[in-house]
């Protein structure tokens, strides 16, 4: 009769070399997994008495290996979604500048790329290593009729006679 789950059993620990373990998992009557009492490591059950290893079938009786189907080589990254505007020179990338779709940029880490999407505050750039989203200056749209409000001086008294913040 073999030991049940939670019972003490002898097994050789591969970490510390101790032999006292606790049974953690079983498959039928066979002990599958144990936990070392010394180092608390989990591993497969290994009999300290050198239990016979499971014998493999001779090569003639084994089922034949099925070869894997070969795959066609796949491009790692596809081509850019837009064509580069070759009439303009390539510009160095700076987050403080604005870029348009089709512009070419030189990035210090990613190399040369093509702007695919340009939005306020960010651009999507196609590089040889893949697409990257980078920062750019936000568009400053000035609406007519609106002005920046004047700063409020809190030290002057309000129309009620008391300074702001006092009640």
Image (tube, rainbow, N blue to C red):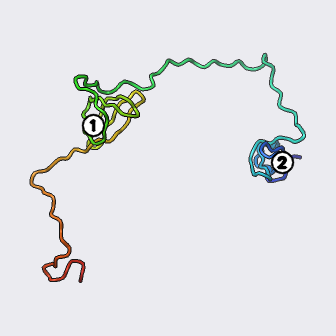
Which sits in the foreground, 77 or 7?
Answer: 77
x, y (%) of residue 136? 29, 41
Q: How many marks?
A: 2
x, y (%) of residue 74? 47, 21
Give the labeled residue for mark 1: 118
Question: In which quarter of the view is residue 156 placed?
Answer: bottom left
Give the labeled residue for mark 2: 18
N-term-proximal mark, 1 vs 2: 2
Q: Is residue 107 left or right of residue 55?
A: left
Q: Secondary structure at mark 1?
A: strand
x, y (%) of residue 148? 15, 58
Question: In which quarter of the view is residue 30 placed?
Answer: top right
Residue drawn at (68%, 19%), measured in percent from left and top? 65
Alpha carbons under labels 1 and 2: distance apart? 64 Å
x, y (%) of residue 75? 44, 22
Which sits in the foreground, 96 or 35?
Answer: 96
Q: Is residue 68 left or right of residue 11?
A: left
Q: Secondary structure at mark 2?
A: loop
Question: In which quarter of the view is residue 93 placed?
Answer: top left
Residue drawn at (77%, 51%), measured in percent from left and top? 39
């Amino acid at each position: 009769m073999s030991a049940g789950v939670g019972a003490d059993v002898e097994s050789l620990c591969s970490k510390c070399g101790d032999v006292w373990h606790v049974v953690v998992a079983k498959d039928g009557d066979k002990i599958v997994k144990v936990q070392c009492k010394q180092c608390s490591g989990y591993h497969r059950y290994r009999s300290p008495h050198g239990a016979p290893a499971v014998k493999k079938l001779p090569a003639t009786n084994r089922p034949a290996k099925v070869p894997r189907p070969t795959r066609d080589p796949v491009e790692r990254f596809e081509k850019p979604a837009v064509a580069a505007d070759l009439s303009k020179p390539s510009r160095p990338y700076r987050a403080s500048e604005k870029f348009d779709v089709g512009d070419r940029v030189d990035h210090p880490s990613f190399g040369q790329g093509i702007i695919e999407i340009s939005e306020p505050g960010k651009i999507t750039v196609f590089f040889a290593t893949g697409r990257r989203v980078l920062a750019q200056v936000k568009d400053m749209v000035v609406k007519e009729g609106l002005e920046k409000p004047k700063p409020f001086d809190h030290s002057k008294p309000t129309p009620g006679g008391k300074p702001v913040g006092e009640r």
